[in-house]
Image (cartoon, rainbow, N blue to C red):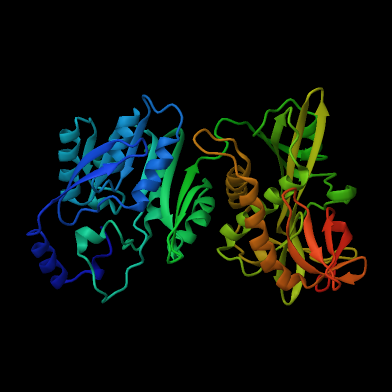
Amino acid sequence: MSGDEYFGSNDAEQEIERFDRVAKQRFWVTPQNRQIHLTIPPTVYPPREDTDLLARVLHDLPNPNGKRLLEIGCGSGAVSLFAAQLGFSVTACDINPFAVASSRNSAQKNGIQIDVREGGPGPQADGEVRQWAGDSPHDVIVWNLPYLTPQINSQHLGPLEEAALLDTDDKGLVTRLLNLLQTTNILADRGVIYLLVSHNERGKSARALCLRNGFAVRSVITHTFDDGECLEVLGIWRPYQLNSKIYKDELDSTNTSLLNSNEKEGDFLQAGRQLAGHGRRGRVWSHEDVAFAGSWVIHEHTLTPNPGLLQLQGGLALFEAIAALTESTDVQVLKWPNDVLIEKGGELRKVGGILVESLSQGKKTRVILGIGCNIASHEFKKDGYSIATLQELDSKISLLDFQRVIQAAVASWFERKTGLLDVKVKSITSHYTSIFSDGIKKLGAPFYRTEGMIFEGVESDGRITLRDQMNTVHIIGDGEDILWSDYEHN
């Protein structure tokens, strides 16, 4: 593995001394309340809270029988052994040869069949993928990712032991994994990766990295320690694999076309040029020199979802796609309920927006999410307003780049994916509140009925709560009713 500069000759000597320690015998209790007998030699990562978290995720997966599972960095083998008990066909790997020996020994001791190999994601010099992952694609991949950021000249447990704790890879292990997903068949069609990360600097960037590489990502479960450290399992997959993606050179409106079509939930329609695109209240959306105009069928069931909440999800998808492409959230502003603005030269200008529309046919309601985003334009001043483009932030951003990332971002918030729960209402509103609160610092104070207000929060139905100077609460459902003191084009 790369990152050898973090370890010196003293570390190697101390590593040798560690081999004199006696292997520990431990009974690990699974989520099914069954015991697995583990032999854990020195330098092998033992089961901890993060192990339990991954095991809980596997326990809740439907229909494991016959599915192929790969665990990267298996350590003691606890998760792999439990997965095999659930019915998965398991391949496990670790760069630590003592972890490989430990997992094989514990599998034999417990009468459980798993295939354990030495190796893992890293430079090709460390071995070809097939050596540690096998030849067949996997339906599920799990990885308790090393989540501590190494410090040069700091104290270490030792190279082998810290391989389970430190991300010493100069490219970043998440980046290496995503590259493997794009260049190999390690993940089966419709497969899902469950990646455990910490909310440190590298862990926080994992979501954006996935989107930037065209992979959908969703939080599955979290665990917060008493000291505030938080671990999270992310579900990662290829977005909308089974859905159609339709492209038309010209269309009046992608939303209108999908509303009146027979396309199914998850299907996507994009126009090279949209001739009669529209926003809220029928406002005209001008199609710039290079622009994205696309729509998804996000709902087609008898139960009608709340349109206000869907708008929040769509706004988050657009905001996160732009943030992933620009690798920054400093200049983007999420304006409730459906616009993303760019701050440039002290001015806020709209770069993109979303529109949710629905149509009821019999007992079913079809809901369409439309997204428009400016990539490049020869003029920024329009009749009474100004626009922004993504290429103002990064001239290298192309329409193809945006297409890939927005597909992943929309799927992250909307796709119904086997093995992953739909996003919960509380997750939507809390995430939106966090990002929107940052945006208010640039938007300025909200004014409702000419009176200055204070933002209080987001309701479960997508409306926002404002409080006036007399402490009276106002719950607002239409963004057109609010003016922002520092945003000229309201």
Is residue 245 at least partly visible in the picture? yes
The location of residue 87, given as percent across then percent down, is 34, 27
The location of residue 76, given as percent across then percent down, is 23, 47
Q: Residue at x 33, y 61 (%)?
A: 167
Q: Among all residues in the image, which is located at the extreme left?
A: 20
Q: Return the residue nearer the eye: 136 or 144.
A: 144
Is residue 490 at least partly visible in the picture? no
Q: Residue at x 83, y 67 (%)?
A: 381
The location of residue 58, given as percent across then percent down, is 40, 38
Q: Quadrant of residue 6?
A: bottom left
Q: Is residue 185 left or right of residue 221?
A: left
258 in relation to 45, above or below: above
395 in relation to 214, above or below: below
Q: Return the residue nearer the eye: 450 or 186.
A: 450
The location of residue 446, given as percent across then percent down, is 82, 68
357 in relation to 406, above or below: above
Q: Quadrant of residue 61?
A: top left
Q: The N terminus appears in which quarter of the rendering?
A: bottom left
Q: The C terminus appears in which quarter of the rendering?
A: bottom right
Report how many numbered discs are placed on residues in the image. 0
Q: Is residue 128 left or right of residue 286?
A: left
196 in relation to 62, above or below: below
Q: Is residue 395 left or right of residue 202?
A: right
